Image (cartoon, rainbow, N blue to C red):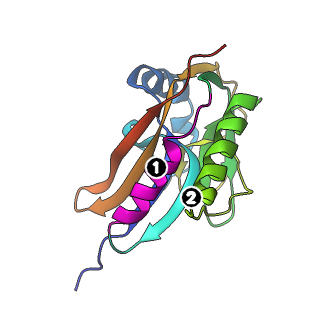
Amino acid sequence: MPHPPTYRLFFALVPPAAVRAEIASVLAPVWPQLAPGARRIAAARWHLTLAFLGSFRARPTLLAERAMAAAAAIESPAFTLSLDHLGHFGGRTRVLWLGMSVVPEALVTLRAELVGGLQAGGVGVDRPADFAPHLTVARGVARPPPEHALAPVAWPVGDFALLLSHQDRGGIIYETLCRWALAAPG
């Protein structure tokens, strides 16, 4: 008997197509350096998680509605990320990621407002004090590739989204439940 699907609900920043294309170009020289068995993440699934709300056996419709209500009150400004650093989480996760040498204060503020609003609305956030902003680009990476200079990729962030992921026979599906625009800077 097949296992029921597992749904994962989370808020994230999702890079637009042009940024994903630029990231793919910057990462092209890195792929041949990865050990066999490493699995690249499809560009369409790249995201930066802001808040993970949990894994569920059934579609978390009511929780998603409460989370959307909390997110609607966010009034953070738009900002730009500079993706310029390749990192690695070892241990059980074995993840290769792309991140920032300098995390913009606007990103930290957006996340704090979001987590605070969710908690005030009775929505639990997994590990609310932990935040290591990154974009996972490969899994099953036993060790990082040799040091590689990366050209920075500018990512203008103008919105954030609530995503629901689940697996079907074709792989993992990401469904955008709602998006919220960030305020114009200044």
| Mark 2 element type | loop
Q: Residues within 10 Å of mark 1 (few under 14, many from 20)?
A: some
Q: Is residue 178 left or right of residue 186?
A: left
Q: Nearer the viewer, residue 94 or 52?
A: 52
Q: Nearer the viewer, residue 94 or 148?
A: 94
Is-magenta flag for residue 70? yes
Question: Where does the image place residue 11, in percent across and percent down from the top left?
Answer: 51, 48
Q: Nearer the viewer, residue 152 or 127?
A: 127
Q: Amino acid at mark 1?
A: Ala
**Residues in magenta, as a range:** 59-76
Which circle's residue, 1 or 2, is located before the other in the chain?
1
Question: Where does the image place residue 127, in percent across and percent down from the top left?
Answer: 67, 62
- The vertical placement of 120 against 106, above or below, is below
- The vertical placement of 182 against 144, above or below, is above
What residue appears at the point 48 percent right and 20 percent down from the top-left corner?
A: 22
Q: Is residue 141 visible?
A: no
Q: Amino acid at mark 2?
A: Gly
- Image quadrant holding the C terminus, namely top right
Question: Where does the image place residue 147, in percent across and percent down from the top left?
Answer: 73, 34
Is-magenta flag for residue 92? no
Residue 165's mark?
none
In the picture of the structure, the residue carrying the numbered disc 2 is: 121
Residue 69's mark?
1
- The vertical placement of 80 against 166, above or below, is above
What residue appears at the point 29 percent right and 77 percent down from the top-left corner?
A: 4
**Quadrant in the rendering for residue 155:** top right
Q: Main secondary structure of the magenta part?
A: helix
Q: Are marks 1 and 2 in contact (CB under 8 Å)?
A: yes
- The vertical placement of 171 against 11, above or below, is below
Q: Is residue 186 left or right of residue 56?
A: right
